[in-house]
Amino acid sequence: MKVLTTVAEVKSFVRAVKKAGKTIGLVPTMGALHEGHLTLMRHAKKNADVVIASVFVNPTQFGPNEDFDAYPREFSRDCEKLDSVGVDAVFHPSAEEMYPKGYTAYVTVDGDITNKLCGAKRPGHFRGVATVVTKLFNITEADKAFFGQKDAQQVVVIKRFVRDLNMNVEVNMVPIVRAEDGLALSSRNKYLSDKEKKAALVLSQSLKEAQKAFKSGKKSVTELKALITEKIQAEPLAQIDYIDIYTFPDLEECEMIVKEALVALAVKFGTTRLIDNTILGGE
């Protein structure tokens, strides 16, 4: 596996791949890789000739009181994992490489898809995401890119600017990967104490209850939100940030679930904020 640290190195690698007539699959990550990330890599391997992963903790998507400095960085271990699933190259730039002195260009996605859920709670977050992902698409000339459903709003935002800006990349969403106990895999899970980790199981449990209620005929958004809220509030260590249900993928408000809907949660356990979701309907 090639380790590339500069834009010039990636572009040289990409030129050779394209000259050989091969397709490129991209998996952007911030590192601290787990099985969820590796599942994305495997999907990329199946759907593209050459896979490039990026490992870059992007400063522009963190707010002033968020965990940028504390975010786990374990690049050597990440490389071992990437190598184990057959990734062809990893792009691991410095912040200065991605945002050199005098950098002023940013991608902003306005409107209803960014002013709710994590977008409402983390001002500027999706500006940072849209900017870095656009840069990665341009640098790698990816034919296909792969993102996890756990960040469903992020996927919606990325698909929107890819469409609006006429980019030549196909964006794929891969289902959430969970531990055996149901906890959605996340790099932030390692911040949790044992008690908090056990308490965090209430997220997947509440989503399961919502799925069960939906399948039994409950389509009211108000009723489903109340069911989830009651379940999570019963856990003393849980501090609800938001519980919302919107149509998917348009993220529009609705009173009843008619087609597909995203049930999205953000809950804090101690100082650690976790997100989770499920998509109801559309079967």
Image (cartoon, rainbow, N blue to C red):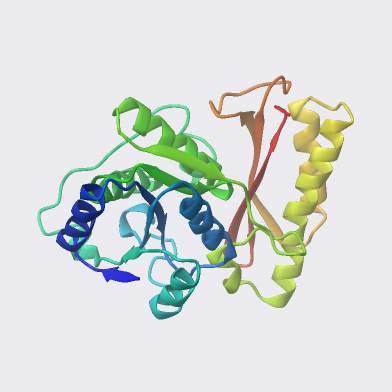
Residue under the image location 50 percent in, 67 percent down: 85
Exactly how many numbered labels are in the figure? 0
Residue 158 in picture, x, y percent from top left: 41, 38
Residue 245 in picture, x, y percent from top left: 66, 33
Q: Image check: 58 left or right of 14?
A: right
In terms of image quadrants, where is residue 12? bottom left
Residue 167 vs 63, above or below: the answer is above
Residue 156 in picture, x, y percent from top left: 48, 35
Q: Image check: 84 left or right of 57?
A: right
Name of the residue lying farthest toward the right? 216
Residue 187 in picture, x, y percent from top left: 53, 66
Name of the residue lying farthest toward the left? 102
The answer to which of 27 and 222 lies nearer the viewer is 27
Residue under the image location 47 percent in, 43 percent down: 154
Residue 5 vs 243, above or below: the answer is below
Residue 112 vs 228, above or below: the answer is above
Can residue 59 be seen here? The reply is yes
Can residue 122 be seen here? The reply is no
Name of the residue lying farthest toward the bottom? 76
- The quarter of the rendered structure image containing the N terminus is bottom left
Name of the residue lying farthest toward the front? 20
- The quarter of the rendered structure image containing the C terminus is top right
Residue under the image location 27 percent in, 51 percent down: 140
In terms of image quadrants, where is residue 274? bottom right
Q: Image check: 271 left or right of 87?
A: right
The answer to which of 239 and 106 lies nearer the viewer is 106
In terms of image quadrants, where is residue 209? top right
